Image (cartoon, grey):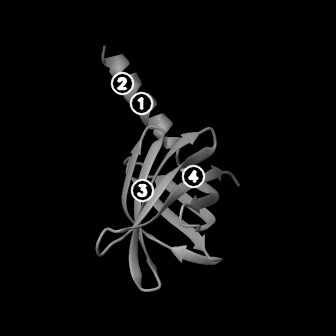
Amino acid sequence: MRFIVFGLVASFFLFAAGLAGTYKGTYSGSAGASGDFVVSLTQADSGEWKSEVTFTLGGADVKTKVTSLAVDGSKVKIVYEFDLQGTALESTITGELNGATLAGDYHTKVVADGSAVDEGTWKATSGP
């Protein structure tokens, strides 16, 4: 019985480790925004995950600060903050890995009052 439990736990960590990598693609929002999108996921030997997210808006690179990251098997949820013309915004992305493609939805809101700014979809592929 212990071997079965160990095997299931080991399988979960090996599958989750398959998420590690850099995924490059695009996003498209309902408010008309679209651009390039890059998500990097790394896992330390301790099992802790880290992420970096960057995207373009109007041709300009936007850097973000990841504030929350959750990995569950092939699924990921990342919350990050960024500044846009002096307004602090927060996006939450959820996605799922299918082959080499990580894709999902995003929702962006104003940090100060929680009002919705944009929502849409994103799709990115790992590779060289």
Res 90 label? none
Task: Point out residue 116 in the picture as x, y percentages from the top left corner.
Answer: 39, 66
Judge whether residue 116 can be spotted in this image: yes
* Amino acid carrying mark 3 in the image: Ile
Q: Which residue is mark 4?
A: 21
Which of pointers 2 and 3 indicates the residue nearer the eye? Answer: 3
Q: How many marks?
A: 4
* Amino acid carrying mark 1 in the image: Ala
Which of pointers 1 and 4 indicates the residue nearer the eye? Answer: 4
Task: Point out residue 54 in the picture as x, y percentages from the top left corner.
Answer: 54, 68
Label 3 residue SS: strand
Label 2 residue SS: helix
Seen from the viewer's position, the closer of residues 108 and 128 is 108
Q: Quadrant of residue 36?
A: bottom right
Q: Are marks 2 and 1 in contact (CB under 8 Å)?
A: yes
In this picture, residue 53 sits left or right of residue 87: right
* Amino acid carrying mark 4 in the image: Gly
| Mark 1 crowd level (few <14, some 14–19, many ≥20, 10 Å Cα) | few
Task: Point out residue 124 in the picture as x, y percentages from the top left corner.
Answer: 62, 53
How much space separates mark 1 and mark 4, taking CA atoms?
20 Å
Q: Residue drawn 59% across and 74% down?
A: 57
Q: Which residue is mark 2?
A: 6
How much space separates mark 1 and mark 3, taking CA atoms?
24 Å
How much space separates mark 2 and mark 3, taking CA atoms?
28 Å
